[in-house]
Amino acid sequence: MWRRTSGSVGRAQLGWRAWSGPLLAVVIVLVLAGLGIANIAVRARWHDVEDGVLWGARAEGVTALEVIPGSPAAQSGVANGDILAAVNGVPVQTPADVVEYQHRGDERTRLEYTLIRLGSRQVLTVSLAAVSRPRSMYFVLAGVGIFTLFVGAWVRLRRPRDQATLHFFWLCVAFFGAFTFSFNGPFDRLDWVFYWGDALAMALLPPLLLHFTLVFPERPARRLWVAPKWFVPAVYAPALVLGVGRVNVVERGAENGALLSAALEILDRAEPIYLFICAVAAVAVLTRAFREITSLTGRRQLRWIAWGIVLGVGPFVCGYAVPWALGADPPLALQLTAVPLGLVPLTFASAIVRYRLRDRAPCSTWRCAS
């Protein structure tokens, strides 16, 4: 009796361990989906206004680090290096105070800036102007991201004991963050969550894509090439460099607005190049895998994954990401190349769920009989 009870407890513990991972995935998906919907809602209703000045905190006070030529502030006489003492007669302590005044207004709002320039005070009236947003495919990409997130969760729940589904789930999370998270302009806590979620996902998406092709489909024991131990950490090393670099730039950028803008642009343009390199490496890994895997199931899985990368990532990288990374400004039509990215989770999911993760030897008559 005791043995049966302990066996039941053991099976219950094993069952809980098997499903604790998928349940955690469900919680993660619900939280991320909620944040994604919030990001879309804020993006849809947010109409930002500004004065055209990058305000920064310095020892002497809130300082104009960069004034955009032709902006309302420039037209009113605000210059680089001016110290903002008060807005509408109320002293300001941080750049966030200035942003808060701007968020309370609209295009018709006029603010009185009390400035200190070369030791003398002067009051200037600045009219706020709407921030012009370039046409983008954000809402389409956000839809692709949410769709990808749910595909990853569905595959994880379908095969909770397969390690490949865990890799695929985190790959889908990275796709979701890269396409759905986007800071909007309020620069409140929630907006910073969107910003860093997007930055983290963009940095991790390339290595996760390449890493997935290294572990799936399962390779035979004897293979032509085995990745050395340092290879996987080396794949993720550029993501770490990009992440640490962005943190340092944001922390130190308050001292120099021009340097902040230039450094962030360099980081933003480096990420698509990183994705391109990892995508090419992933195709090379899959090509080599065709020489190693002889099973029919494994080859079918390889075809699904290879076609997903070529048809999904290829058009976006070649038509939009790489030209933009090299300094070009692709038109809106080329942004449509992001839509086929939805093929990546679909083809990967089909490779995992539709086919078995490994071939099983056919059961011969004498084995079955025994």
Image (tube, helix red, strand yellow):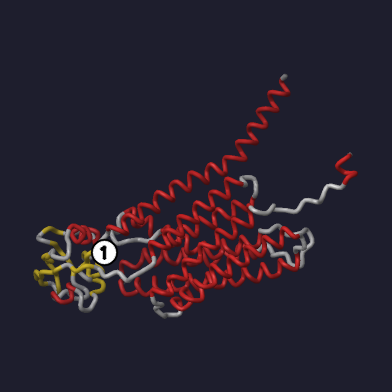
Q: Residue 335, how many percent across, how many down?
A: 42, 71
Task: From the viewer's perspective, tell me whether residue 184 is left or right of residue 245.
Answer: left
Q: Nearer the viewer, residue 216 or 138?
A: 138
Percent across and percent down for residue 239 are 51, 65
Please state which of residues 40 and 112 is positioned toward the viewer in this rendering.
40
Which residue lies at the image location 90% right of the left edge and 44% below the top edge?
Answer: 366
Kind of residue indicated by mark 1: Ala
Looking at the image, residue 155 sits to the left or right of residue 81; the answer is: right
Residue occupying image coordinates x 65% and y 36%: 14
Q: Quadrant of the N terminus?
A: top right
* Residue 228: quarter of image: bottom right
Q: Residue 297, position in %: x, y?
A: 72, 58
Q: Position of residue 286 (x, y in %)?
A: 67, 67
Quadrant where the C terminus sits is top right
Q: Which residue is mark 1?
A: 57
**Residue drawn at the location 65% of the way across and 62% of the way down:** 214
Q: Is residue 308 above or below residue 20?
A: below
- Residue, far front: 365
* SS of the residue under disc 1: strand
Residue drawn at (46%, 74%) of the image: 320
Pointer 1: residues within 10 angstroms few (<14), some, or many (20+)?
some
- Of 279 and 153, the residue lying toward us: 153
Examine the rendered structure and indicate whether residue 300 appears above or below residue 321.
above
